[in-house]
Image: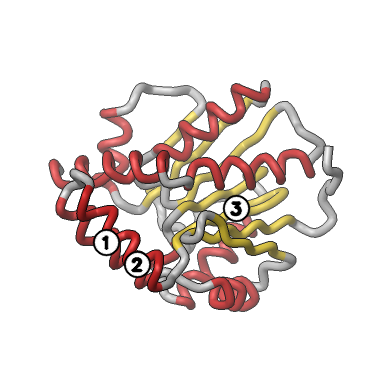
Amino acid sequence: MADLVANLTDLRWLNRYLGSHWLLCRAVQRLWRRMDSPARLRVLDVGTGAGDIPEVLLRWGARRGVLLTVVGLDRHGGILQYLRTAQPASASITYVQADGLCLPFLPQTFDIVVCSTMLHHLDGTQGSALLHSMAAMARYGVVVNDLLRGWLPYYAARLLFAVTACHPVTRHDGALSVLRAYRVAEVRAIAQHAGVAPVQISTALGYRWMLVYTRPGEAMSEA
């Protein structure tokens, strides 16, 4: 458990200072505006991991007067045990143990479904199943962001983890995660195989990609 806690602590730090939080909130805000800026949002975070994404989304909502309820879902029981005991209880965040490839909710239960830095753990078939499952749960849209495969991001990751005081598990997995990550064309193929369209896929910061899916027929105003 000590190794897990140290790794999750590192992930929270990395997500915060390497741009993952900023990219996710920017994409969620884009969808929210297309929804005519509702005062309430129900969000599902698939593969919640360190549990930082629900907290970041609540802070984003608070700054804009949006009341959010967030469900953080993860298949790892040890992670959820840690989140439920180590973090302050919040009536706006609920944790659920389940497999993201087969989400245990009715279709369109959530306004937006998000997933951050999880897809690179899956092969292409699993990735398609994940996107298909997420899209089915979303009333308005889906946001996915992850690492971008490439030699420059790989060597940058090796340098970063060589000079930071991260846990050995984090240092070992960090650079390897870049090698397991997808290129934009591969992400587009995964989405196409999942039947998720239309999607917008963009790169940012030189080492991350962002996929945004908007359910056809929903409000598209740019308020």
Q: Which residue is mark 2?
A: 154
Q: State whether residue 12 is above or below residue 157.
A: above
Question: Do the residues bearing badges 2 and 1 touch, measured as CB atoms within 8 Å?
Answer: yes
Q: In the structure shown, which secondary structural element does the residue marked by tag 3 occupy? A: strand
Q: Amino acid at mark 2?
A: Tyr
Q: In the structure shown, which secondary structural element does the residue marked by tag 1 occupy? A: helix
Q: Which residue is mark 1?
A: 158
Other residues around mark 1 within 10 Å, as few (<14) / some (14–19) / many (≥20): some
Percent position (x, y) of residue 62?
60, 22
Q: Which residue is mark 3?
A: 143
Q: Which of 50/135 is in front?
A: 50
Percent position (x, y) of residue 127?
49, 70
Q: State whether residue 194 is above or below residue 57.
A: below
- Mark 1 and mark 3 lie on one chain; the one further toward the N terminus is 3
**Residue sitting at 52 percent across and 69 percent down?**
129
Task: Kindly identify which numbered label has been placed on residue 31.
Answer: none
Q: Which of 3/43 is in front?
A: 3
Look at discs 3 and 2 and give the one toward the viewer.
2
Question: Do the residues bearing badges 1 and 3 touch, measured as CB atoms within 8 Å?
Answer: no
Q: Which of 21/134 is in front?
A: 21
Percent position (x, y) of residue 203?
58, 61
Q: Quadrant of the N terminus?
A: top left
Q: Quadrant of the C terminus?
A: top right
Q: State whether residue 57 is above or below residue 208.
A: above
Question: From the viewer's perspective, is 166 left or right of 95?
Answer: left
Give the image quarter of residue 35.
Answer: top right
Q: Amino acid at mark 3?
A: Val
**Residue sitting at 29 percent across and 67 percent down?**
176
